[in-house]
Image: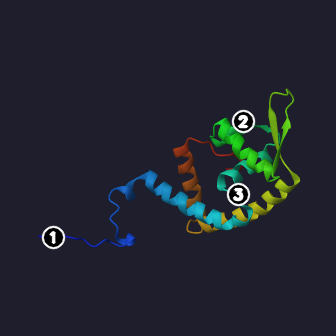
């Protein structure tokens, strides 16, 4: 007697079991979709969403220390140093010795400011595409719910 063979289902017909009811699973699918669109929008810049966020934070907080930036983005200092090295090698930011000579402050370079300004335009289009299926109230609600899940307070300017 030969073993019974079953036909594989196409991915669209795959039974996902309990996964669709899990917040983490839905958040991960949403993150993948958002990151794919971001990658397409920012392809020419070669900057990931995380590095874009770092550049935005340095622009908004000129002279921010590496330690403070690491805390803000949730990275350990050694990981952050490697990322900053890459951004510095690309001429997007620079380190300057701090007032007490034990810390380095971070600033965007002239090139970093130009690249970031162009990226912000692309990211605005990316955000519009991502949010196109939501009305303004739904978008505000989603952002509020995500902030509750992450435990982050809304930025003062977003209110």
Q: Visible in this render: residue 124?
A: no
Identify the disc placed on residue 68: 2
Q: Visible in this render: residue 39?
A: yes
Query: Foreground: 123 or 87?
Result: 87
Identify the disc placed on residue 47: 3
Residue 130, x across and y down, in percent: 60, 65
Residue 98, x across and y down, in percent: 85, 32
**Comes first in the chain, label 1 or label 2:** 1
Cα–Cα gap, marks 3 and 2: 21 Å
Helix, strand, or loop for circle 1? loop
Query: Foreground: 149 or 156?
Result: 149
Q: Residues within 10 Å of mark 2 (few under 14, many from 20)?
A: few
**Mark 3 near mark 2, Cβ–Cβ under 8 Å?**
no
Q: Quadrant of residue 148?
A: top right
Q: Quadrant of the N terminus?
A: bottom left
Query: Is 90 displayed left or right of 3 in the figure?
Result: right
Residue drawn at point x = 53 percent, y = 50 percent: 145
Label total for image: 3
User: Which residue is disc 1 drawn over?
Assistant: 2
**Mark 1 near mark 3, Cβ–Cβ under 8 Å?**
no
Give the label, 1 or 3, closer to the camera. Answer: 1
Give the label, 3 or 2, closer to the camera. Answer: 3
Residue drawn at point x = 79 percent, y = 43 percent: 61
Q: Residues within 10 Å of mark 3 (few under 14, many from 20)?
A: some
**Comes first in the chain, label 1 or label 3:** 1
Query: Foreground: 40 or 79?
Result: 79
């Amino acid at each position: 007697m030969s073993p019974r063979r079953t036909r594989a289902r196409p991915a669209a017909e795959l039974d996902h079991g309990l996964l669709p009811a899990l917040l983490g699973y839905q958040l991960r699918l949403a993150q993948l979709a958002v990151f794919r669109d971001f990658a397409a929008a920012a392809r020419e810049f070669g900057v990931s969403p995380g590095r874009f966020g770092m550049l935005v934070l340095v622009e908004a907080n000129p002279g921010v220390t590496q330690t403070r930036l690491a805390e803000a983005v949730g990275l350990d200092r050694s990981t952050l140093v490697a990322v900053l090295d890459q951004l510095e090698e690309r001429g997007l930011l620079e380190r300057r010795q701090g007032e007490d000579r034990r810390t380095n402050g971070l600033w965007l370079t002239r090139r970093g400011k130009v690249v970031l300004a162009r990226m912000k335009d692309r990211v605005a289009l990316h955000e519009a595409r991502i949010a196109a299926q939501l009305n303004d109230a739904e978008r505000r609600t989603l952002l509020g719910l995500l902030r509750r899940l992450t435990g982050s307070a809304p930025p003062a300017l977003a209110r």
